Image (cartoon, grey):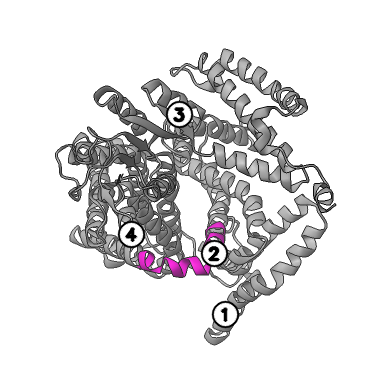
Amino acid sequence: MGGWLFDAFVYLCAAVIAVPVAKRLGLGSVLGYLLAGIVIGPMIGLVGAETEEIQHFAELGVVMMLFLVGLELQPRMLWRMRGQLLGLGGLQVALTTGLIAGFGLLFGLSGTLALTIGLIFSLSSTAIVLQTLNEKGLVKTAGGRASFSVLLFQDIAVIPMLALIPLLALPELAGTGVEVQVASNAEALAGGAPHNESLSLVAGLSGWAHTLVVLAAVATVLLGGHYLSRPLFRFIADSRLREIFTAAALLLVIGIALLMTLVDLSPALGTFLAGVVLADSEFRHELESDIEPFKGLLLGLFFITVGAGIHFGILFDDAFLILGLTVGIIAIKALVLFGLALVFRLAPADRWLFALGLAQAGEFGFVLLSFSLQSQAIPGELAETLSLVVALSMLLTPALFILSERLVRRQTASGGQEPAREIDTPGTVIIAGSGRFGQIVNRLLVASGVNTVVLDHEAATIDMLAKFGVKGYFGDASRPDLLQAAGIESAQAIVIAIDDRERAVQLVDYIRRHYPQVKTLVRAYDVNHLYRLNKAGADLAVRELFDASLLLGKETLKAIGMHPFKVERMARAFRQHDQAGLDSLYELWDADVAMSSNKAYLARAREHGATLAEFLETDRLQLHDRSERGWTPPPKGYTEHLEE
């Protein structure tokens, strides 16, 4: 069986099955695509030689990804982050490249080959790391922010690397079967179809004319993106045809890629520059939403072909070398990152997250490997070996995150965490977590004359609070010794507003068992978290967005012309109905069964939702009772009566 229909079915089927399973296991979509390729390629052999040809087409996804990266990089944001970008990111790429290249020289590699390998392994996996940080709620920590800065710099650094690698071509590889000229490398990224030299705008030109044409092409991208794209997209948007706007977005990306190939430049560089130019455009989000599905599918296809092309025979033939290289690369990168974390004074917990979270190679490693192979900058056999090292290091990423968590936990248990400042005055109320929620609670209590002790595990947050004159203490609020130092034994209440849902539940349980006299008031993320907190023994758990959402809903009703009095009555009735529903549904809630799978819970939730409109209407028609006099507005025209 063969044909493109069969190939398309196999690739799509593998992706549809493997990616959701990988995400459910916490491995991320990139690893899911790689595993899908490994299954249909080396394992069961459903795909074969056509993989390389498909990969050339799928590399267009890389071009689109760099366009989207450029769209995210507003010049003002880049300027604001210049310190961390150039400091953390720049030093990480430079030091990692230098160290890996140095080891390559020690093992007898040539200088250009060692530098190429250093560049390839200096990059980490943006897709896996950002997704993992999001899933673990670590994006806003100091370690998460530092990781984001490094990943952002790496994404930008890919552009000069793509331009540099052709200059590192090895003369001895010429005529060895990797017969792809440097000038045609960009074509592969643009779609893989070899372009006819007669279509080149620079073929046969003298040096100065070549330079002028290249500069003119770059200027066309920059000036056209700034001055022509806006009226063009505005004209197309006025037609109100979504598919034409999507076609125009694709035309823009593919057109720039084509223009770059015609002048022997990297299409990725051209689309990245166009993305930066359009970052401030009013059409930015529309372009993102239109390009994103194509980028996702093509990138997924690219990673599947990478997985399908991995030669596991190399691993079985020389397992010691492959595993040694993988561990060595991870160790070198972790060492560099940990050193930078010390220099930039990250907290101990953030250092391990930063060092181990970014220690793997990344998806751009595959791109640079493919590009290096086509540029004759790396031998084919070595490229296969290094491709396997990149894949193995990415597969180890979940284990690296688990290792960082265990190291932090052990460090905390042994008292090795950054010493908390001595708490001089125990608090009447302890506030665990001083993010956007805990800060408001603290301001109200302090303004009301209540003595509080604020605990937060983010040193940067404590420093920021100090600048506003708010006293806080660094430390993990779940540590018993820190709670005792904060005066938990004599406190009247503790407000738990930490970001970690599981730790919040555990803290409620600990307080309930050891200090039952202390009132526990907790921020809940959603209904399920609220139920878990209630089950753990919280005295009061409130959903963090409920009141803000209700307030916005009330203001919306007023904005569309509803009388404020009626709005207040309906909001109050809605709150009563919602509370009744929470109590009723709690009877059917099961901590061991997902709410979306609990049929009895879902049935009662639908039944409760159906009665809402009826409940509000009944309440609206009721006459005002005595208790609501305070809300009853005066009748219209009452001032006229008074004037008489």
Q: CA distance from mark 1 to mark 4?
A: 54 Å
- The question of residue 74 being in magenta is answered with yes
Sooner in the amino-acid sequence: mark 2 or mark 1: 1
Q: Residue furthest front?
A: 644
Identify which amino acid the numbered label 4 is placed on. Gly
Whether pointer 1 and pointer 4 mark residues with C-beta atoms closer than 8 Å, the reply is: no
Residue 210, percent from left and from top? 56, 81
Q: Is residue 495 above or below residue 512?
A: below
Sooner in the amino-acid sequence: mark 3 or mark 1: 1
- Residue at 73 percent across and 48 percent down: it is 559
Quarter of the image for the N terminus: give it.
top right
Query: Is residue 579 something one can see in this rendering?
Result: yes
Sooner in the amino-acid sequence: mark 2 or mark 4: 2
Q: Nearer the viewer, residue 350 or 300?
A: 350
Residue 590, percent from left and from top? 47, 16
Identify which amino acid the numbered label 1 is placed on. Leu
Q: Which residue is mark 2?
A: 272
Label at residue 512: none
Q: Which residue is mark 1?
A: 215
Q: Which residue is mark 4?
A: 469
Q: Is residue 119 left or right of residue 424?
A: right
Dot 1: element: helix
- Residue at 56 percent across and 57 percent down: it is 68
Give the magenta range: 67-86
Identify which amino acid the numbered label 2 is placed on. Phe
How crowded pointer 2 is (Cα within 10 Å; few <14, some 14-19, many 20+) is rated as many
Dot 3: element: helix
Q: Is residue 418 above or below residue 539?
A: below
